[in-house]
Image (cartoon, rainbow, N blue to C red):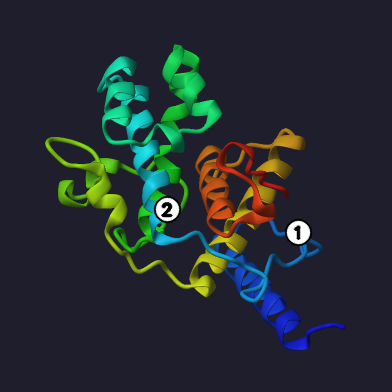
Amino acid sequence: MLNISTNEEGLSRKERTEEILKKEGIKINFNLPYIETEEETTLRTSEEIARRLTVLAVTNLIAFDSIEPEEAIDYLKEHDLCDFVTPDEKDFLNDPTEHKKSQESWKCECIWVLFWALKIVDTLPFPDELCDLNDIPAEHYPVGGDLDPNDFINRRYEVRSKSEILDAADLYYRYDWACVDARINNLEMEKIDSGIVYERHYALNWLITYMDQDWDDVSCDT
């Protein structure tokens, strides 16, 4: 039986997002469906988000040549985090080629989204410039200096509401469609950066447990 209130929630969110895109001059596909509703969504927990953020922060240090992979592996072992490193991340740790480092460096955007979900940063800025993780205060970063990453992981953060995260997920779903459409039609996407959009869409889909997919397997359907 159709849940009218749920249906209205999804449609309302879709329409609000389309108004944003219209103001920003981003191409809209009015036939795209609305995404999951609050009733259908289970958010990741504070601990899950903080742990995922921590592992990403470690692999990101390798991507930017801040630490050696052996040092990262020892660090993850020392703090009992190896079980939370994904198969793809293990592959990266064991063989961090320049190509893989380049790919992994984009995960700055995922890290920023997870900081946003934990209310450590206030906004997801317009996706036309890469975020700068140096803007995160050191005391709020999970790794570095003498910090124990498990202190960061075990701290109880207030996760943003389903409504707020779903609003962002809907927006980036439609941004991503516009980027894919431009690529398919050999058009230059001038207003937003498709790489930034993809990474943020990826992290948001993980946050809302889209299709119950693990981190390595998150899909960004458009």
Rendered position, 80 above or below 206: above
Circle 1/circle 2 CB separation < 8 Å: no
Q: Is residue 178 left or right of residue 155?
A: right
Q: Is residue 213 left or right of residue 60?
A: right
Along the line of sight, the residue nearer the viewer: 35 or 195: 35
Q: Position of residue 61 (x, y in %)?
A: 31, 28
Q: Which residue does the image show at 63% across and 43% down from the upper left?
A: 218
Question: Which residue bears the numbered disc 1?
Answer: 29
Question: Which residue bears the numbered disc 2?
Answer: 49
Q: Amino acid at mark 2?
A: Ile
Q: Position of residue 13 (x, y in %)?
A: 63, 74
Number of disc labels: 2
Q: Is residue 105 left or right of residue 179?
A: left
Disc 1 crowd, CA 10 A, few/some/many (<14, 14-19, 20+): few
Q: Amino acid at mark 1?
A: Asn
Q: Which residue does the image show at 61% across and 68% down from the upper left?
A: 17
- SS of the residue under disc 2: helix
The quadrant where residue 160 appears: bottom left
- SS of the residue under disc 1: loop
Q: Which residue does the image show at 65% across and 55% down from the upper left?
A: 210
Residue 96 in sight: no
